[in-house]
Image (tube, rainbow, N blue to C red):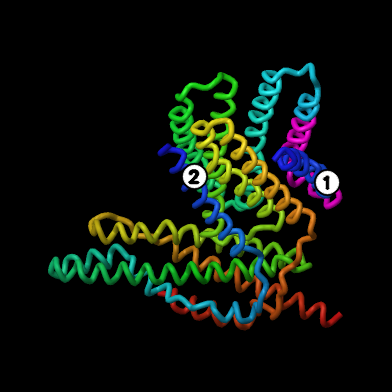
Amino acid sequence: MMIPVVLALIGFLALSMMLYFATTHRHKGGDLDQLASQLKPIDVNAFRNLIDEGEEEFLRRNLHAAEFRSILRERKLAAVEYIWCAAQNAAILIRLGEAAKQDPDPVVSAAADKLLDNALRLRLYAFQVVPRLYLGLLFPGASLAPYFVADSYEAINRQAVMLGCLQHSTREMSSAS
Amino acid sequence: MLFLRYYFWIAPHVLLAGLLVGIYRRGLLRRLPFFIVYIFLELAQFLALLTMNWLPAASENEYHWILVLGLGMSVLVKFGVIYELSNELLLSRSSLVDLWRRLFRWTAGVLLLVAVFASATLSSTGVKNIESIFHFLDLSSAIIQSGILLVLFVFTRALHVPWRSYTSGVALGFGIFSTLELSTSGFRLESGSGGSIVIDLIQMAAYHVCVLIWVAYVLVAERSPVISGRGLQKEEIELWNQEVQRMVRR
């Protein structure tokens, strides 16, 4: 009787999770301006510094072991906060990109699609990098620097600008005609 | 009880036939080919079993074989539908293809082992051959499908992948049905024939709910979300980007 009970519990848990995800994760409307205002600027340079292996090596050579461990911990935790912030921005850009994808101009729609793809990539990287940073806390000697997040973040920012320009020029053209 | 059994047996299939017409009218035939095949298969199996049920010449054994064959084919096609859903949601996005494929393979592999273990443990209680195969298929497919669908839901949720109305409807329908099958299948072997009838009724009711969800999501026209505001504007984005660029420059 043990296995059927376990399977039943797993089944009901999975059902509740699916219902929760299906009801909360739908196409959302809302105020796009308010959404765009939630985008937080990220100090990518500071983030790069936090995950720079050379910087870490320098600190290791010049600090006492206990002091180094304490600073390393602070640096990794700060890097995690940066990544979560970038991942939240990516989530907002996904919604803004999804709205822009409905634009009748195929150029704007294609740019929005590219932005969406990169924002998804950034979220994906964020989920891969955060455990690596925590692992870096446990194994300070291991090389776990996630540089690609910073690169990816810069790439989606460039695409967001391009998309904004495209939408702006399309609206100007349509209001002129 | 007899009325309920007939109702839960016939009503979902009548709705499925209506759903097929609705899918054709909404032009979704090419988008959901595996789902269409699944509906055809379900309808064909239903008609065959209904005929055999009222045909005095058909034996119980023949009826069970048709049931098992239908279930086997339906399980395979359901995996096709899940692939179709993940294709619609994830595989069209180049950044997610590799990770999703790896995740899908690992999930399917682990779930297959769990399903074989659970089914083997439960079917060792000594049942007739054909019923054994039916229970094995029933439980194994429920475990694997529930697991893969749950991973798909979690994965898309974590990455904020947008769902279209009909994809979420089809996935949710299969999700509800497979998780309720998973919750009840294990008890089938432990209970007697009376218990088995109750489990049958629960699973048939779950299937009815599942078909109603498909009808609601597929046939009710997708409502566009109400959007206000202009979104990302050139100046705002440039300012925001300049700030980031300034910070990035070494």
Pointer 2 residue: A8
Q: Is residue B35 magenta?
A: yes
Q: Measuring 67% from the left and 33% from the top, which residue is drawn there?
A: B74
A2 sits left or right of B213 in the view: left
* Closer-to-camera residue (A131/B232): A131
Up the image or down, A32 lies above or below B163; here it is below
B154 sits left or right of A140 in the view: right
Find residue A25 and report its horizontal and vertical position in percent.
60, 63
* Closer-to-camera residue (B15/A146): B15
Pointer 1 residue: B18
Find residue B84 and report its horizontal and vertical position in percent.
66, 44
* Closer-to-camera residue (A4/B40): A4
Q: Measuring 20% from the left and 70% from the top, which residue is drawn there?
A: A70
A176 sits left or right of B31 in the view: right
Q: Report the magenta residues as a range.
A: B24-47
Up the image or down, A138 lies above or below B128; here it is below
Q: Secondary structure at mark 2?
A: helix
Amino acid bearing label 1:
Gly
- The quadrant of the picture occupied by the N terminus of chain A is top left
Q: Please tell me how many numbered marks the rendered image carries.
A: 2
Q: Secondary structure at mark 1?
A: helix
Q: Measuring 72% from the left and 38% from the top, which residue is drawn there?
A: B2
Up the image or down, A32 lies above or below B212; here it is below
Magenta: main secondary structure equals helix
